[in-house]
Amino acid sequence: MKTCFSAIQPTGIPTLGNYLGALRNWVNLSREYTGIFSIADLHAITVRQDPGDFRRRVRAVYAICMASGLDFKNGAVLFPQSQVAAHTELTWILSCFTMYGELSRMTQFKDKSLKNSDNINSGLFTYPILMASDILLYGAAAVPVGSDQKQHVELTRDIAVRFNGVYGDVFVLPEPFIPDMGARVMNLQDPKRKMEKSDPNPNGYISMLDDREAIIKKCKRAVTDSGGEVRYDEKLKPGISNLMTIYSLCAGKSLEETEREFSGQNYGTFKTAVGEAVNTALAPIRDCANEYIGNPAHLDKLMNEQTRRATELAAPMLKQVKNAMGFVAD
Protein backbone atom coordinates (compact mmCIF):
# COMPACT_ATOMS: atom_id res chain seq x y z
CA MET A 1 0.00 0.00 0.00
CA LYS A 2 1.37 3.45 -0.93
CA THR A 3 1.95 6.12 1.70
CA CYS A 4 0.56 9.66 1.92
CA PHE A 5 1.75 12.44 4.20
CA SER A 6 0.09 15.63 5.37
CA ALA A 7 0.38 18.01 8.31
CA ILE A 8 -1.53 20.84 9.96
CA GLN A 9 -0.06 23.72 11.95
CA PRO A 10 -1.29 24.36 15.51
CA THR A 11 -1.44 28.12 14.98
CA GLY A 12 -5.08 28.11 16.06
CA ILE A 13 -8.10 25.81 16.33
CA PRO A 14 -8.70 24.24 12.88
CA THR A 15 -11.43 25.88 10.85
CA LEU A 16 -14.17 24.59 8.61
CA GLY A 17 -11.77 25.37 5.77
CA ASN A 18 -9.14 23.08 7.32
CA TYR A 19 -11.74 20.35 7.65
CA LEU A 20 -13.18 20.57 4.14
CA GLY A 21 -9.84 21.25 2.48
CA ALA A 22 -7.61 18.91 4.49
CA LEU A 23 -8.88 16.83 7.41
CA ARG A 24 -11.80 15.30 5.53
CA ASN A 25 -9.40 14.26 2.79
CA TRP A 26 -7.09 12.80 5.44
CA VAL A 27 -9.92 10.52 6.52
CA ASN A 28 -10.61 9.36 2.96
CA LEU A 29 -6.93 8.91 2.15
CA SER A 30 -6.33 6.94 5.36
CA ARG A 31 -8.60 4.26 3.87
CA GLU A 32 -6.68 4.08 0.59
CA TYR A 33 -3.11 4.78 1.72
CA THR A 34 -0.93 4.27 4.74
CA GLY A 35 -1.59 7.73 6.13
CA ILE A 36 1.19 9.57 7.97
CA PHE A 37 -0.28 12.71 9.54
CA SER A 38 1.43 15.29 11.73
CA ILE A 39 0.78 18.31 13.90
CA ALA A 40 3.39 20.64 12.39
CA ASP A 41 4.50 22.38 15.57
CA LEU A 42 8.04 22.97 14.23
CA HIS A 43 6.63 24.84 11.24
CA ALA A 44 4.51 26.96 13.57
CA ILE A 45 7.45 28.54 15.40
CA THR A 46 8.45 30.77 12.47
CA VAL A 47 5.98 33.04 14.32
CA ARG A 48 6.55 33.68 18.05
CA GLN A 49 4.35 31.44 20.21
CA ASP A 50 3.32 31.79 23.86
CA PRO A 51 4.48 28.49 25.46
CA GLY A 52 1.32 27.79 27.47
CA ASP A 53 -1.05 28.61 24.64
CA PHE A 54 1.13 26.67 22.21
CA ARG A 55 0.95 23.46 24.28
CA ARG A 56 -2.82 23.78 24.65
CA ARG A 57 -3.28 24.32 20.92
CA VAL A 58 -1.11 21.34 19.99
CA ARG A 59 -3.27 19.11 22.22
CA ALA A 60 -6.51 20.64 20.94
CA VAL A 61 -5.52 20.25 17.28
CA TYR A 62 -4.41 16.69 17.98
CA ALA A 63 -7.78 15.97 19.60
CA ILE A 64 -9.68 17.39 16.62
CA CYS A 65 -7.62 15.33 14.16
CA MET A 66 -8.25 12.20 16.23
CA ALA A 67 -11.96 12.97 16.32
CA SER A 68 -12.16 13.48 12.55
CA GLY A 69 -12.23 9.74 11.90
CA LEU A 70 -8.78 8.65 10.69
CA ASP A 71 -8.60 4.94 9.88
CA PHE A 72 -5.94 3.78 12.35
CA LYS A 73 -6.78 0.12 11.58
CA ASN A 74 -5.34 0.73 8.12
CA GLY A 75 -2.00 1.88 9.55
CA ALA A 76 -2.60 5.63 9.90
CA VAL A 77 -0.29 7.50 12.27
CA LEU A 78 -0.85 10.92 13.88
CA PHE A 79 1.92 12.60 15.87
CA PRO A 80 3.44 15.96 16.85
CA GLN A 81 6.23 16.70 14.37
CA SER A 82 8.71 17.94 17.01
CA GLN A 83 8.61 14.60 18.83
CA VAL A 84 10.24 12.70 15.95
CA ALA A 85 13.86 13.90 15.81
CA ALA A 86 14.45 12.44 12.34
CA HIS A 87 12.52 15.37 10.83
CA THR A 88 15.06 17.96 11.95
CA GLU A 89 18.05 15.72 11.23
CA LEU A 90 16.96 15.06 7.66
CA THR A 91 16.21 18.77 7.21
CA TRP A 92 19.88 19.67 7.68
CA ILE A 93 20.94 16.99 5.20
CA LEU A 94 18.42 18.15 2.60
CA SER A 95 19.40 21.79 3.10
CA CYS A 96 22.70 20.83 1.49
CA PHE A 97 20.76 19.72 -1.60
CA THR A 98 18.54 22.81 -1.83
CA MET A 99 19.59 25.88 -3.77
CA TYR A 100 19.27 29.42 -2.42
CA GLY A 101 17.58 30.53 -5.64
CA GLU A 102 14.90 27.85 -5.25
CA LEU A 103 14.00 29.02 -1.77
CA SER A 104 14.01 32.69 -2.77
CA ARG A 105 11.38 31.96 -5.42
CA MET A 106 8.89 30.45 -2.98
CA THR A 107 5.68 32.47 -3.15
CA GLN A 108 4.73 31.77 0.47
CA PHE A 109 8.04 33.15 1.72
CA LYS A 110 7.35 36.40 -0.11
CA ASP A 111 3.78 36.58 1.20
CA LYS A 112 4.69 35.76 4.80
CA SER A 113 7.60 38.20 4.76
CA LEU A 114 5.16 40.99 3.95
CA LYS A 115 2.87 39.92 6.80
CA ASN A 116 5.72 39.50 9.31
CA SER A 117 8.14 42.23 8.24
CA ASP A 118 9.47 42.54 11.81
CA ASN A 119 10.36 38.83 12.02
CA ILE A 120 11.74 37.59 8.68
CA ASN A 121 13.78 34.78 10.21
CA SER A 122 15.80 32.10 8.43
CA GLY A 123 13.26 29.46 9.50
CA LEU A 124 10.66 31.23 7.38
CA PHE A 125 13.08 31.04 4.44
CA THR A 126 14.04 27.37 4.91
CA TYR A 127 10.52 26.26 5.85
CA PRO A 128 10.10 24.30 2.56
CA ILE A 129 13.13 22.12 3.38
CA LEU A 130 11.50 20.96 6.62
CA MET A 131 8.35 20.25 4.62
CA ALA A 132 10.41 18.22 2.15
CA SER A 133 11.86 16.22 5.06
CA ASP A 134 8.37 15.56 6.42
CA ILE A 135 7.30 14.11 3.09
CA LEU A 136 10.43 12.23 2.00
CA LEU A 137 11.09 10.67 5.41
CA TYR A 138 8.12 8.33 5.02
CA GLY A 139 8.34 7.61 1.29
CA ALA A 140 5.07 9.44 0.66
CA ALA A 141 3.72 9.02 -2.86
CA ALA A 142 0.79 11.41 -2.34
CA VAL A 143 0.67 14.73 -0.48
CA PRO A 144 -2.78 16.24 0.07
CA VAL A 145 -2.27 20.02 -0.03
CA GLY A 146 -4.06 23.20 -0.89
CA SER A 147 -3.18 24.79 -4.22
CA ASP A 148 -1.05 27.36 -2.34
CA GLN A 149 1.25 24.57 -1.13
CA LYS A 150 1.73 22.85 -4.50
CA GLN A 151 4.95 24.80 -5.12
CA HIS A 152 6.48 23.28 -1.99
CA VAL A 153 5.70 19.74 -3.17
CA GLU A 154 7.32 20.55 -6.52
CA LEU A 155 10.44 21.73 -4.67
CA THR A 156 10.39 18.50 -2.65
CA ARG A 157 10.48 16.54 -5.90
CA ASP A 158 13.39 18.65 -7.16
CA ILE A 159 15.35 18.00 -3.97
CA ALA A 160 14.62 14.26 -4.16
CA VAL A 161 15.67 14.09 -7.82
CA ARG A 162 18.90 15.93 -7.01
CA PHE A 163 19.70 13.58 -4.11
CA ASN A 164 18.77 10.45 -6.08
CA GLY A 165 20.92 11.62 -8.97
CA VAL A 166 23.96 11.46 -6.68
CA TYR A 167 23.18 8.51 -4.41
CA GLY A 168 20.70 6.31 -6.27
CA ASP A 169 16.97 5.79 -5.90
CA VAL A 170 16.64 6.55 -2.20
CA PHE A 171 13.60 8.83 -2.17
CA VAL A 172 10.12 8.27 -3.60
CA LEU A 173 9.01 11.21 -5.78
CA PRO A 174 5.76 12.56 -4.28
CA GLU A 175 2.76 13.91 -6.16
CA PRO A 176 0.48 16.68 -4.82
CA PHE A 177 -3.13 15.65 -4.22
CA ILE A 178 -5.50 18.60 -4.65
CA PRO A 179 -9.25 17.90 -4.44
CA ASP A 180 -11.49 19.38 -7.13
CA MET A 181 -13.69 21.27 -4.68
CA GLY A 182 -13.06 22.57 -1.19
CA ALA A 183 -9.27 22.88 -1.30
CA ARG A 184 -9.65 26.63 -0.72
CA VAL A 185 -12.66 27.54 1.40
CA MET A 186 -12.71 31.31 1.54
CA ASN A 187 -13.09 33.85 4.33
CA LEU A 188 -16.73 34.56 5.23
CA GLN A 189 -16.08 38.31 5.51
CA ASP A 190 -13.70 38.59 2.56
CA PRO A 191 -14.34 35.83 -0.02
CA LYS A 192 -11.20 36.80 -1.93
CA ARG A 193 -9.04 35.52 0.94
CA LYS A 194 -8.60 31.97 2.17
CA MET A 195 -10.32 31.05 5.45
CA GLU A 196 -7.53 30.93 8.06
CA LYS A 197 -7.49 29.95 11.74
CA SER A 198 -5.16 32.85 12.56
CA ASP A 199 -7.59 35.48 11.22
CA PRO A 200 -8.03 38.27 13.79
CA ASN A 201 -11.72 38.60 12.83
CA PRO A 202 -13.62 35.58 14.29
CA ASN A 203 -16.55 36.24 11.93
CA GLY A 204 -14.29 35.40 8.98
CA TYR A 205 -13.96 31.74 9.86
CA ILE A 206 -15.85 28.89 11.52
CA SER A 207 -13.86 27.03 14.16
CA MET A 208 -14.31 23.27 14.35
CA LEU A 209 -15.14 23.74 18.04
CA ASP A 210 -17.79 26.44 17.44
CA ASP A 211 -21.24 25.49 18.74
CA ARG A 212 -24.38 25.52 16.61
CA GLU A 213 -25.40 29.05 17.64
CA ALA A 214 -22.01 30.51 16.70
CA ILE A 215 -21.99 28.68 13.36
CA ILE A 216 -25.46 29.89 12.37
CA LYS A 217 -24.60 33.45 13.40
CA LYS A 218 -21.38 33.52 11.38
CA CYS A 219 -23.09 32.13 8.28
CA LYS A 220 -25.86 34.73 8.54
CA ARG A 221 -23.23 37.49 8.75
CA ALA A 222 -21.28 36.15 5.77
CA VAL A 223 -20.62 38.68 3.00
CA THR A 224 -22.57 37.95 -0.17
CA ASP A 225 -23.14 39.82 -3.42
CA SER A 226 -25.61 42.10 -5.14
CA GLY A 227 -28.74 40.36 -6.32
CA GLY A 228 -30.52 37.54 -4.57
CA GLU A 229 -29.99 34.53 -6.81
CA VAL A 230 -28.22 31.47 -5.40
CA ARG A 231 -25.99 30.81 -8.40
CA TYR A 232 -22.36 29.74 -8.65
CA ASP A 233 -20.07 32.30 -10.27
CA GLU A 234 -16.64 32.72 -8.66
CA LYS A 235 -15.86 36.00 -10.44
CA LEU A 236 -19.18 37.84 -10.22
CA LYS A 237 -20.54 36.22 -7.04
CA PRO A 238 -17.55 35.15 -4.91
CA GLY A 239 -19.41 35.36 -1.59
CA ILE A 240 -22.39 33.25 -2.55
CA SER A 241 -20.15 30.87 -4.51
CA ASN A 242 -18.08 30.26 -1.37
CA LEU A 243 -21.22 29.53 0.65
CA MET A 244 -22.43 27.19 -2.09
CA THR A 245 -19.14 25.31 -1.97
CA ILE A 246 -19.43 25.00 1.80
CA TYR A 247 -23.05 23.83 1.66
CA SER A 248 -22.41 21.36 -1.16
CA LEU A 249 -19.48 19.76 0.65
CA CYS A 250 -21.23 19.59 4.02
CA ALA A 251 -24.51 18.33 2.57
CA GLY A 252 -22.89 15.91 0.12
CA LYS A 253 -24.42 17.55 -2.95
CA SER A 254 -23.10 18.90 -6.23
CA LEU A 255 -23.13 22.63 -6.96
CA GLU A 256 -25.81 22.01 -9.58
CA GLU A 257 -28.01 20.26 -7.01
CA THR A 258 -27.52 23.15 -4.60
CA GLU A 259 -28.54 25.67 -7.26
CA ARG A 260 -31.72 23.71 -7.99
CA GLU A 261 -32.55 23.25 -4.30
CA PHE A 262 -32.41 26.99 -3.58
CA SER A 263 -33.79 28.27 -6.87
CA GLY A 264 -36.13 31.17 -6.16
CA GLN A 265 -35.13 31.40 -2.49
CA ASN A 266 -33.43 34.40 -0.91
CA TYR A 267 -29.96 34.69 0.58
CA GLY A 268 -31.27 34.69 4.15
CA THR A 269 -32.92 31.29 3.76
CA PHE A 270 -29.83 29.92 2.07
CA LYS A 271 -27.42 31.22 4.73
CA THR A 272 -29.45 29.56 7.49
CA ALA A 273 -29.38 26.28 5.55
CA VAL A 274 -25.61 26.60 5.14
CA GLY A 275 -25.21 27.05 8.90
CA GLU A 276 -27.35 24.00 9.67
CA ALA A 277 -25.43 21.86 7.17
CA VAL A 278 -22.11 22.97 8.65
CA ASN A 279 -23.26 22.19 12.19
CA THR A 280 -24.50 18.75 11.15
CA ALA A 281 -21.08 17.99 9.63
CA LEU A 282 -19.03 19.32 12.55
CA ALA A 283 -21.15 18.36 15.58
CA PRO A 284 -19.94 14.72 15.94
CA ILE A 285 -16.30 15.80 15.54
CA ARG A 286 -16.73 18.71 17.97
CA ASP A 287 -18.32 16.47 20.63
CA CYS A 288 -15.66 13.76 20.28
CA ALA A 289 -12.80 16.31 20.31
CA ASN A 290 -14.15 17.93 23.47
CA GLU A 291 -14.16 14.50 25.16
CA TYR A 292 -10.48 14.05 24.28
CA ILE A 293 -9.64 17.56 25.47
CA GLY A 294 -11.48 16.88 28.72
CA ASN A 295 -9.31 13.81 29.37
CA PRO A 296 -5.71 15.06 28.87
CA ALA A 297 -4.07 11.97 30.40
CA HIS A 298 -5.75 9.70 27.86
CA LEU A 299 -4.96 12.13 25.03
CA ASP A 300 -1.26 12.26 26.01
CA LYS A 301 -1.16 8.44 26.16
CA LEU A 302 -2.50 8.21 22.61
CA MET A 303 -0.08 10.90 21.45
CA ASN A 304 2.90 9.08 22.96
CA GLU A 305 1.89 5.76 21.40
CA GLN A 306 1.51 7.34 17.98
CA THR A 307 4.83 9.18 18.33
CA ARG A 308 6.64 5.89 19.02
CA ARG A 309 5.12 4.39 15.89
CA ALA A 310 6.13 7.39 13.78
CA THR A 311 9.69 7.25 15.16
CA GLU A 312 9.93 3.58 14.15
CA LEU A 313 8.61 4.35 10.67
CA ALA A 314 11.03 7.25 10.14
CA ALA A 315 14.19 5.48 11.28
CA PRO A 316 14.80 3.22 8.24
CA MET A 317 14.70 6.09 5.73
CA LEU A 318 17.05 8.26 7.75
CA LYS A 319 19.43 5.31 8.13
CA GLN A 320 19.28 4.65 4.37
CA VAL A 321 20.06 8.30 3.60
CA LYS A 322 23.03 8.40 5.96
CA ASN A 323 24.38 5.09 4.71
CA ALA A 324 24.09 6.24 1.09
CA MET A 325 26.04 9.40 1.92
CA GLY A 326 28.82 7.54 3.72
CA PHE A 327 28.18 8.55 7.32
CA VAL A 328 29.68 6.20 9.90
CA ALA A 329 27.01 3.64 10.84
CA ASP A 330 25.35 3.84 14.24
Image (spheres, helix red, strand yellow):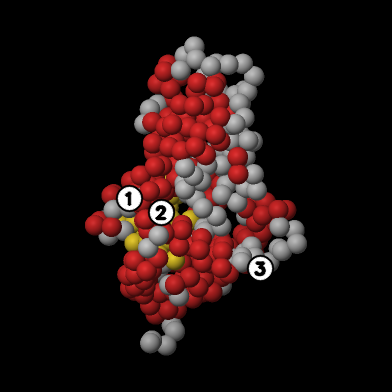
Q: Residues within 10 Å of mark 3 (few under 14, many from 20)?
A: few
Q: In 3D space, how far apart are the residues under numbered discs 1 and 3 (Cα atoms)? A: 36 Å
Q: Are marks 1 and 3 in contact (CB under 8 Å)?
A: no
Residue at the spot 39% in from the left edge and 42% down from the top edge: 283
- Quadrant, the N terminus: bottom left
Q: According to the image, label 1 marks what residue?
A: 69
Give coordinates of residue 228: x percent, y percent.
58, 16
Instruction: Please name the amino acid that badge 1 sits on.
Output: Gly
- The local crowd at label 1, few if under 14, some if 14 to 19, many if 20 or more residues have their Cα within 10 Å, is some
Mark toward the viewer: 1 or 2: 2
What secondary structure is marked by label 2? helix
Taking 287 as reference, is 83 above or below it? below
Gap in angstroms between the C-alphas marked 1 and 2:
14 Å
* Residue drawn at 34 percent across, 56 percent down: 35
Figure quadrant of residue 3 = bottom left
Q: Which residue is mark 2?
A: 290
Residue 268 % position (x, y): 54, 22
Nearer the observer: mark 1 or 3; the answer is: 1
Q: From the image, tell me which residue sits under label 3.
A: 122
The residue sitting at 67% across, 54% down in the picture is: 112
- What amino acid type should be assigned to the residue bearing mark 2? Asn
Residue 69 position in % (x across, y down):
33, 50
